[in-house]
Image: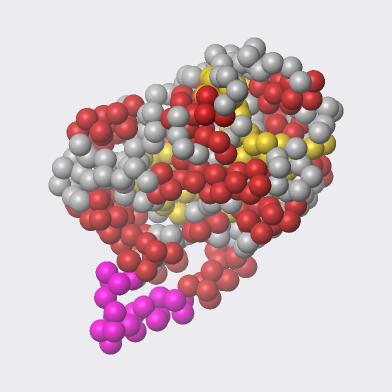
Amino acid sequence: MKILLLSSPVVQPDFDRIARLPSLGLVSLAAHVDDICTVHVADIHGLKSHRDYVKRIVNGYDLVGLTAMSFQYHEALELARIAKEAGARTVFGGYHPTLACEEIGNSSVAELIDYIVRGEGEATFRELVEAIIKGKNLKGILGLSYHEVNGDSESGRKMIHNPGRPLLKVEDIKMPNRDVRLIKKGFYSFDVPIDSVESSRGCTQGCKFCSINLMYGRRFRKFSIERVIADIQDAEAHGAGSIFFPDDNITLDPKRLELLCQAIIDAGLTHLRYKTQASASGIASSRRLVDKMGEAGFDGVFLGVESINKRNLQFLGKGKMSDDAEKAVRYLHENNIIVSTGLISGNPDDDEEDMWENFRLARQLKVDFPIFYISTPYPKTQMRAELEEMGLVTRNDFTKYDGLHANLKTHHLSDEEVQYITWQMNARYYDLDWMRYNKVKRLYPRWFVNEILRLAPFYARRKLDLALRRRTTRDFFREDLESGELCKGVT
């Protein structure tokens, strides 16, 4: 049996210039079936013509797997269509297929999807592959959705959803198999080759906008530090010079993160560059932790700050305002660590002034890369239910559910006004003041110079067009909406 696993080709163009990572989840799945079949992983999100590539390689595979978040689901269906035309069966996994499995099963495109592996996929996927190889019944496979035919007619097909699977014990999860990747180059953070290594799974917090709890429950499971070090070494052996920890909340246990940093130091792996996402409170809880992160080689952290507005933090389920943000950013910057922050606007009671508060917070903190997210009503989340009840959800086109498009209005602003204000924030932030204080130019000077050389003519043309009144800011806004590059704006 031959299996092809495809990453989603749909990514954010703006983020893709800073970092492009190969899929960790797919090589983890591959590790759990590589002893019973031939399996390959194709990370196609860096390709210019990904559909042509898939058409070229898909022949001969018996099963094609696709993973998708909500904004990636539509294109995954198009790739599934290609796979079906080549004679393969298809299996979907990831956040959107997991949370929307019943809707998918009842939809007009259900025929493109033979199986859905829901939630944590490694054990379910292995049992599915074993069942296909041996011709066994699928009824007993926990976490699996599949078609069942009633009678002799295809019109009697319906999708069956087996009970969910309990979370795995981390010691039963195998190390990723990076050897199965078909595309081995083109993945980087700034200008350094990168790969992902997980040290934990899950989060115990209850953010209302997040889908993680719906996938894993409010659980936090930790891999052994010995396994994490071995995984880092394997990633380096496969060409990585930088490591991203995609843990859902790596700072839930700050002392363990400090131990991991010490293990990196003891293993002689400080020549690599490490990046992760973290909570502001976790980082601010220990200056010693952040010093150890700097010593281990961390040079980038994404902080979930979310908002300066206490009312919005309460709505988002973030509890108290992260008064720790200033301390966290200071600790990180003092260790020469680049800081990115997620700041969410477009919440129910936001007016224009509320939205610009987040801009001023980023400026006050001297954040290197603020990401001005727009509140997004992701399917099945608690926040979506509340927003629908308020009548604020304006768009159900999931291709726009990426955190950067406005899919709702507020009590004071239309969805277009929310989008336009956010668009303005993005370019205004990167001014001469930012040029002076950002850490990027020192840590990644070549990347920084290349970006300045790329963007300077772009903004010069826009300023000239404005000065000559050939175009308006609204023209540029609509242009960027069309291209999907929403982090440009007009300086």
Q: Is residue 433 left or right of residue 24?
A: left
Nearer the observer, 147 or 165: 147
Q: Quadrant of residue 186?
A: bottom right
Q: Is residue 399 magenta?
A: no
Q: Is residue 37 left or right of residue 97?
A: right
Q: Is residue 190 above or below residue 296?
A: below
Q: Quadrant of the N terminus?
A: top right
Q: Quadrant of residue 103?
A: top left
Q: Residue at x 20, y 44 (%)?
A: 410
Residue reaching furthest to the bottom: 468
Q: Quadrant of the C terminus?
A: bottom left
Q: Is residue 210 above or below residue 22?
A: above
Nearer the observer, 486 or 281: 486
Residue reaching furthest to the left: 412
Q: Is residue 467 magenta?
A: yes
Most common SS among magenta residues:
helix
Q: x%, y% of residue 301?
A: 53, 44
Asked if one can make out residue 81 in the rendered structure from this viewpoint, the answer is yes
What are the residue bounds of the magenta stretch?
Answer: 456-476
Asked if one can make out residue 195 in the rendered structure from this viewpoint, the answer is no
Q: Is residue 224 left or right of residue 389?
A: right
Q: Quadrant of residue 308?
A: top left
Q: Residue at x 70, y 23 (%)?
A: 128
Q: x%, y% of residue 10?
A: 54, 51
Q: Residue at x 64, y 12 (%)?
A: 140
Q: Residue at x 75, y 37 (%)?
A: 62
